Image (tube, helix red, strand yellow):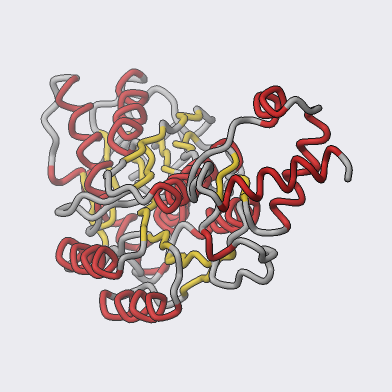
Amino acid sequence: MTRQDDILNDLIQAFHNGRYKPGERLLPIRDLAVELQCSPATLAAVFRELTQRGYIRSRGRLGTHVTDKSAWGHTPEQHSNQLIGVMISETLSMLPTIEQTLLNAGYSMVLSQCHQTREQAIACIEHWRKMGLHGVIWSPISSKEHVDDNQAIASVIAASGMKAVAVDRYPQTMEVNSVVSDNAHAAMMLTHHLLELGHKRIGLIRHRHGSTPEDRARGYEQALRAADISPKASLVLTVDHGMEHELLIKRIASWIKKNKPTAVWSIAGDPLGQALLAATQRLGLSVPDDLSIATFDSIIASTPMTCIIQPLEAIAKRAVELLLSHIDHASDEITRIVLPSELRIGQSTSQPIADATRAV
């Protein structure tokens, strides 16, 4: 029997006699190799075999953990209930990172495409509970009754016994595990940039419902007040999610023409930012000479746009890692992770000119 076989058998026996418990994080290979008096290469080969037999699972930067006893003796493919449900209706660009991070950890993603109403979301959660899924990554919805709806969804998830992490948004009346960007601070940065350029009449285009638009609107108002400028209701255009694109363009154009801001930013790139750009073109305004514009998230434009870049890949990866950590350690502690965004200054913003509203 080789030294590799000896170490493999000793570790398997250690799992079964309780020396290493399910969910426990093992020492890094180099450190454990010193303890076991073997080379790191030999132990790496043992780890590969233990992974194939279902005893351990790598969690990326979270380390390598002992799996649940139900997985022991099974390959990841045989252990079919390693499933995580994902309900994201808008920030779909996070899905590839979520899926790859789950795959790296030995899990598969079960994607919901019915996450538009409270009833659909709850029905999906109940279905996943019956399937025996291990956890849920979800994005709170932006419905008219989003406060009550998201509290109801979060309550059903909690009652299901499945661990869960919210991404991009959070329910506003219930503490849950979540990973989001620092929306209020990013909005302050963007508004402060326009203030530093000399703009006094800064307009905001926002959606009506959800934690994200409310946080970004709050940051906008805080930046104005810090500059001794009282926020004006007339300089905030609030629209519903899902508004038809042509109607949205007309609404924005009419609002700009009536209220004459010298700078405008939208809380989303698509569709609000795209509609804002189209409205300026329809009004015959030159960007940024007649009107400075900026968005959250980048949009395709002939002029490089000033925008907030959110760390969407990092949000997706951290959400998976947080969820798997709670699954491994059966923790009931509530964790909210807030990640910073980046202000990217393009050519769509500049100092206002004296007769900036002449073309409106």
Whether 158 is drawn above or below 223: the answer is below
Residue 274 spot, x, y in % from top left: 47, 54
Q: Quadrant of residue 226?
A: top left
Query: How far from the left and from the top, in percent, is residue 348?
Result: 49, 34
Q: Is residue 210 left or right of residue 302?
A: left
Residue closest to the eye, 287 or 273: 273
Residue sitting at x 44%, y 25%: 350
Q: In the rendered view, tell whether residue 200 sits above or below residue 112.
A: above
Look at 32% across and 29% down and name the residue there: 355
Which of the two residues, 28 or 116, is positioned nearer the viewer here? 28
- Picture quadrant of residue 341: top left
Question: Can you say whether 168 is above or below 354 in the image?
Answer: below
- Number of numbered discs overlaid on the protein picture: 0
Q: Nearer the viewer, residue 335 or 264?
A: 335
Relative depth, front residue between 319 and 91: 319
95 vs 117, left or right, is right
Placement of 106 over or under 20, stated as above or below: below
Whether residue 129 is visible:
yes
Q: Quadrant of the C terminus?
A: top left
> Residue 294 placed where, x, y %?
42, 38
Q: Residue at x 75, y 25 (%)?
A: 37
In the visual, does 309 lie left or right of 256? right
Residue 298 visible in the picture: no
Question: In x, y percent, where is residue 83?
Answer: 53, 67
